[in-house]
Amino acid sequence: MINEVGVGLFMHVAKTREVKQKVQALSVWSFVLLFALLGTVVWGFDDAGIQRGTLRVIFFDVGQGDAALIETPSGIQVLVDGGKGRIVLQGLGRELSFFDKTIDMVVATHPDLDHIGGLPYVFARYEVPLFLSSGIEDDGADNMALIAAVADEGARSEIITEPYTLLLDDGVQLDVLFPDRDVRKVEANTGSVVLRLTYGATSFLFTGDAPTSIETHLIDLYGDALKSTVLKLGHHGSNTSSALPFLGYVSPEYAVVSAGCDNSYGHPHTDVINNLHMLDVTVLDTCTHGDIVFVSDGGMVSVQ
């Protein structure tokens, strides 16, 4: 259900979309005009090959960390986390149009380096009108750098304290499932933002580093409504997340492990992978596959 917070943020995103589309249109036509003056024929711009009517969700290979880009059919973009360092910029450069210098919304699930370390570079490279976070208090250098980058950008910054829904596009909604309270003084992983993206009959669940205690809480809150086509495994496939009851409620077709190769944490954990195989879930990991690109037409999800 859309509450007042969701409506306000949706209006902000909608306004950003209108301005962004106008800017991109002007940029493309300027490019066409330039080549026309040079006597070059330019054919068929397709905004980085994106098919109209399709939703794309890209889980970037950022090593031991998380970074995922949502791109709606009309081109609205949401970045969930940014890994650490500049590597996220390489992924964004591959996926976004040359003329696209705006990311409509950035979400930081929690202030761990492997989730927010790359975000200051994103704010420096792109215009970001809206920033959502758990608001967890962290006076470490990485979080302070992010706070400064958001302020320098002049982005609207919102701390999540309750569930709400954002309507990103026709038929595309982003449900903020957690936090459902003020978590500013909560341990970072426990306060992770949890999101569920829905397009038609398809859905994606983003869990940050949420531990099993929060998974149990989510089951109590939402039950069967957690069911999702794609699950981004909590805490990079650690056995501190992805408990079997939670996996049963989500019942994904695909599970994504965002983790570095031969990482020192042993992610993903063997027990988690065995449980996923027992449930006949297709497991994809960024170490093996690099960037993982999902495409949804609203009826089914495929992997590019």
Image (cartoon, rainbow, N blue to C red):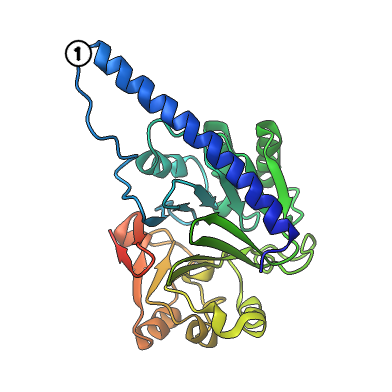
Image coordinates of residue 73 in percent, x first then y, are 41, 52
> Looking at this view, is 6 or 79 the one in front?
6
- Horizontal placement of 277 versus 205: left or right? left
| Amino acid type, callout 1 | Gly
> Looking at this view, is 85 or 150 the one in front?
150
Image coordinates of residue 163 in percent, x first then y, are 69, 67
Image coordinates of residue 296 in percent, x first then y, are 36, 62
Residue at coordinates 75% horizontally, 62% vertically from top-left? 161
Residue located beneath label 1 in the image: 39
Identify the image quadrant of the N terminus. Answer: bottom right
Q: Is residue 139 above or below residue 153?
A: below
Q: Is residue 60 above or below residue 239?
A: above
Residue at coordinates 80% horizontally, 62% vertically from top-left? 185
* Res. 266 image quadrant: bottom left
Image coordinates of residue 18 in percent, x first then y, are 54, 38
Residue at coordinates 71% horizontally, 45% vertically from top-left? 157
Examine the rendering and report whether any part of residue 83 can be seen: no
Element type where label 1 sits in the image: loop
User: How many numbered marks appear?
Assistant: 1
Examine the rendering and report whether any part of residue 193 can be seen: yes
Q: Is residue 224 above or below residue 68?
A: below
- Horizontal placement of 36 versus 183: left or right? left
Residue at coordinates 41% horizontally, 25% vertically from top-left? 27
* Res. 162 image quadrant: bottom right
- Horizontal placement of 33 versus 102: left or right? left
Identify the image quadrant of the C terminus. Answer: bottom left
Would you call the spot at circle 1 few (<14 residues within 10 Å), some (14-19), or many (20 or more)?
few
> Looking at this view, is 128 or 81 the one in front?
128
